Amino acid sequence: MKKKTIVPYFFMVMIMVLAACNATGNQAGSATNQESPAAQFPTGKFTAPDDQYSGFYYYDDGTSAYFQDGSILVEGTYTIDGDILTDTVGGLAAEEEGCGDPATYRWSYDGTNLKFALVGTDNCPGRNSTMDGSTWVYAGPAPAR
């Protein structure tokens, strides 16, 4: 009679142990498998919603380029800290008044649309007018350089 009592308890304990392991595994898996926002920043070609000939290239190495009509107009670098992108303009564009200073933008990405909103101030009029409040549509991988 003791064997009949022990067997159901054994299965009950096993079920509880497995359930606990599964719950712990999911929690640990969620924490370790979730990518940080920086890891989620999309790279590739992003175009204006109404103009496929202008937009940005974002590369994995932290470089970027603004293009229009097939020509790269401005190159620069970016860094990501959570949902904040810090943009630094390079080349001749950096010599324009205020454009040598980095600017920060809050970014969001829904899998198609990359959006930017200014955080603080941006003294570079061209960058500010291009990025603040803007939406860019993913258009595929950035071309090789």
Image (spheres, rainbow, N blue to C red):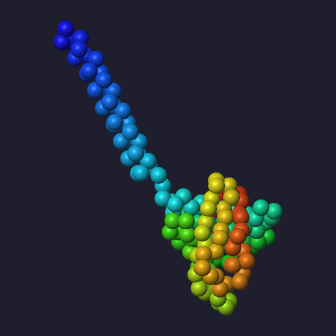
Q: Position of residue 45 (x, y in %)?
A: 67, 62
* Identity of the residue furthest to the right in this view: 50
Q: Position of residue 76 (x, y in %)?
A: 61, 77
Q: Residue at x 80, y 64 (%)?
A: 51
* Identity of the residue furthest to the top in this view: 1
Q: Is residue 62 visible?
A: no
Tag count = 0
Name which quarter of the figure residue 11 lies in.
Answer: top left
Which sits in the foreground, 141 or 32?
Answer: 32
Determine whether, in the image, residue 97 is placed left or right of residue 50.
Answer: left
Q: Residue at x 33, y 37 (%)?
A: 21
Q: Quadrant of the N terminus?
A: top left
Determine whether, in the image, residue 27 is placed left or right of residue 94.
Answer: left
Q: Residue at x 60, y 69 (%)?
A: 106
Q: Position of residue 50 (x, y in %)?
A: 81, 62
Name above or below for residue 19 compared with residue 6.
Answer: below
Name which quarter of the figure residue 123 lies in.
Answer: bottom right
Name above or below for residue 73 compared with residue 49.
Answer: below
Q: Residue at x 67, y 64 (%)?
A: 115
* Identity of the residue furthest to the left in this view: 2
Q: Position of residue 86 (x, y in %)?
A: 56, 75
Determine whether, in the image, residue 47 is placed left or right of residue 83.
Answer: right
Q: Quadrant of the C terminus?
A: bottom right
Q: Is residue 134 visible?
A: yes
Name which quarter of the figure residue 8 lies in.
Answer: top left
